Amino acid sequence: MATTRDYGDRTPREAASHVRAPRKSLAETRRLSGTPGTIVATARQLFERDGVRATTVTAIAREANVTRELVYYHFRNKNGVIEAVIDDYVEDLVESLIAWNELRVFGDTAGSLAACVRTFRYALYDAEGSPRPMIGVLEELGVRDAFDVRATQETVDCLHSHIATEYAAHHQVEIELVYEMFCVAIFGLVGLVKVRPAISDEELMKVVEQTLRLDMAPLA
């Protein structure tokens, strides 16, 4: 995992494409804390409210109640702050998956799938179905597609390494390329919701069930 002093070496496009090594465990967090975390949280808020181009390092420092020099110490330049914000957006999505996993009931595949679909929709859209503010930031930076690829890969790494193994221990897995089919399912859901924003959670569940050939029978 990169330290805060490493931020600033990549352009926004490179940052949106840079996939980190898989997590060793679901307890591992990659969200920055302390002063760097405060700076990133502040930058996110300003980027989403005012836009990336309109937000200066001076504005970030003032809003975070730190000096400009401290921002540059941790992130080198504005690109470093942008890179850290993109990392934080990826962490939002992966942590939502981890939170879903912690709350799901063992053996209740149908209930777990319903909660997973709700988690997916909530991660990208608000209650009215409007895209979350991070989408506007990514589109302003011109990195939406690269971010989607990276977020999918890191999410699938987490699913495949830590969650699918438990399912496979209690169910017959009826697909051969599990990792690849997870990628198909996630990319497909993102695209499907773009095409049909009003699609119901029940329909999305059926798509996932059929794509992954899930065994929906509850375990004893």
Image (cartoon, rainbow, N blue to C red):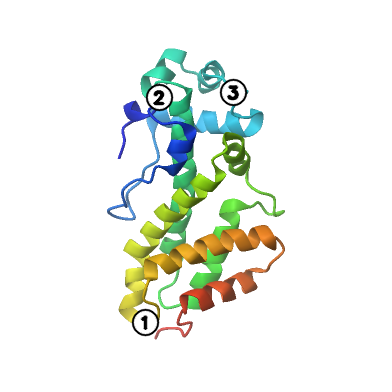
Q: Mark 2 or mark 1, which is nearer the start of the sequence?
A: 2
In the depicted view, which residue is nearer to us: 15 or 202?
Answer: 15
Can the viewer see residue 67?
Answer: no
Residue at point 31% right, 48% down? 21
In the depicted view, which residue is nearer to us: 128 or 160?
Answer: 160
Question: Around disc 1, counting alpha carbons within 10 Å, would you say few (fewer than 14), some (14 to 19), or many (20 or more)?
Answer: some
Q: What residue type is labelled 2?
A: Phe
Q: Which mark is residue 75?
A: 2
> Do the CB atoms of the residues marked 3 and 1 lie less than 8 Å apart?
no
Label 1, secondary structure: give it: loop
Question: Around disc 2, counting alpha carbons within 10 Å, would you say few (fewer than 14), some (14 to 19), or many (20 or more)?
Answer: many
Quarter occupied by residue 163:
bottom left
Label 3, secondary structure: give it: loop
Q: Mark 1 or mark 3, which is nearer the start of the sequence?
A: 3
Quarter occupied by residue 201:
bottom right
Q: Residue 171 carries which label?
A: 1
Q: How far apart are marks 2 and 3 (CA)?
A: 15 Å
x then y, percent, for residue 203: 64, 73
x then y, percent, for residue 206: 58, 76
Label 2, secondary structure: give it: helix
Q: How far apart are marks 1 and 2 (CA)?
A: 46 Å
Pick the quarter of the image with the C terminus.
bottom left
x then y, percent, for residue 97: 45, 58
Q: Which amino acid does label 3 sit on?
A: Thr
**Image position of 97 (left or right of 55):** left
Residue at point 53% right, 22% down? 60
Q: What residue type is labelled 1?
A: His
Question: Around disc 3, counting alpha carbons within 10 Å, would you say few (fewer than 14), some (14 to 19), or many (20 or more)?
Answer: some
x then y, percent, for residue 176: 36, 76
